Amino acid sequence: MGLVHLPDELLIESYFKAVELKLSKEFILLIEKEIQRRSLSHKIKKSV
């Protein structure tokens, strides 16, 4: 299956939860790659 079938909003939520829970960097990178593939990177950029 993979991340391809995950709705965009759930993918974004999963990213933030993975970071919050300090899950493995490999897992977070996997989510980030899928976010980039979907052109959703702007949704995870931190506002300064």
Image (tube, rainbow, N blue to C red):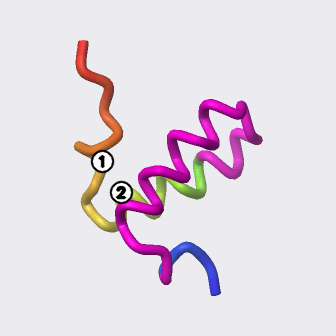
How far apart are the alpha carbons under marks 2 and 1?
5 Å
State whether residue 5 is above or below residue 12.
below
Q: Are marks 2 and 1 in contact (CB under 8 Å)?
A: yes
**Which quadrant of the figure has residue 36?**
bottom left
Q: Is residue 19 magenta?
A: yes
Q: Which residue is mark 1?
A: 41
Quarter of the picture containing the C terminus is: top left
Q: Secondary structure at mark 2?
A: helix
Left or right position of 11 against 1? left
State whether residue 15 is above or below residue 48.
below
Residue 35: x and y in percent read 39, 58
Q: Residue furthest right?
A: 24
The label shown at residue 31 is: none
* Camera-nearest residue between 24 and 20: 20
Q: Residue drawn at (30%, 48%), measured in percent from left and top?
A: 41
Q: Secondary structure at mark 1?
A: helix
**Which quadrant of the figure has residue 34?**
bottom left
Magenta segment's dominant SS is: helix
Q: Residues within 10 Å of mark 1 (few under 14, many from 20)?
A: some
Q: Amino acid at mark 1?
A: Ser
Q: Residue drawn at (37%, 61%), measured in percent from left and top?
A: 9
Residue 43: x and y in percent read 27, 44
Sequence-wise first label, 2 or 1: 2
